[in-house]
Amino acid sequence: MTGTVTVTAQGPLPGVPALGVAMFARLGVSPALGVARALPDGAPAAVYEPRIGADRAAERRARFRTAVQGLLAP
């Protein structure tokens, strides 16, 4: 979970992970393509910046973990 809230993510679409899977599938079908040709062209259409700082994100993660531990404790 570390870094999920505090790292800037860029991608052409909100479904960027799906594009990565598609790229690997394309390479699986045609390995001769190479990574450069299997990747989608173009720059990101959107940049997603964190709305909270690293300290606040760490505090939220700690509270979340405490709550989960409370639910899982016998």
Image (spheres, rainbow, N blue to C red):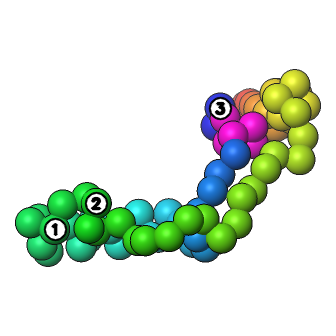
Q: Which residue is mark 2?
A: 36
Mark 2 element type: helix
Q: Residue at x 26, y 67 (%)?
A: 37
Question: Counting residues from the N terminus, which is met first, the one under dot 1 or under dot 3?
Answer: 3
Residue drawn at (90%, 40%) of the image: 52
Please report contact status of discs 1 and 2: CB closer than 8 Å, yes or no: no
**Residue 57, how many percent across, how many down?**
83, 34
Residue neighbourhood size for the residue with mark 1, other residues' Cα within 10 Å, grouped as few (<14), some (14–19), many (≥20): few
Taking the spot 56% from the left edge, 65% from the top edge, the residue there is 43
Q: Residue furthest front?
A: 42
Question: Could you tell whether 35 is left or right of 48 in the image?
Answer: left
Q: Are marks 3 and 2 in contact (CB under 8 Å)?
A: no
Task: Determine which of the numbered discs, if any, sits on residue 22 in the image.
Answer: none
Q: Residues within 10 Å of mark 2 (few under 14, many from 20)?
A: few
Question: From which residue to which does the magenta span run?
Answer: 3-7
Q: Is residue 48 above or below residue 70?
A: below
Q: Amino acid at mark 1?
A: Leu
Q: Which mark is residue 2?
A: 3
Q: Quadrant of residue 35?
A: bottom left
Contact between labelled residues 3 and 1, with CB atoms less than 8 Å apart: no
Residue named by callout 1: 33
User: Would residue 63 be visible to someone looking at this image?
Assistant: no
> Between 71 and 13, which is closer to the camera in this rendering?
13
Image location of residue 39, percent across then percent down: 35, 66
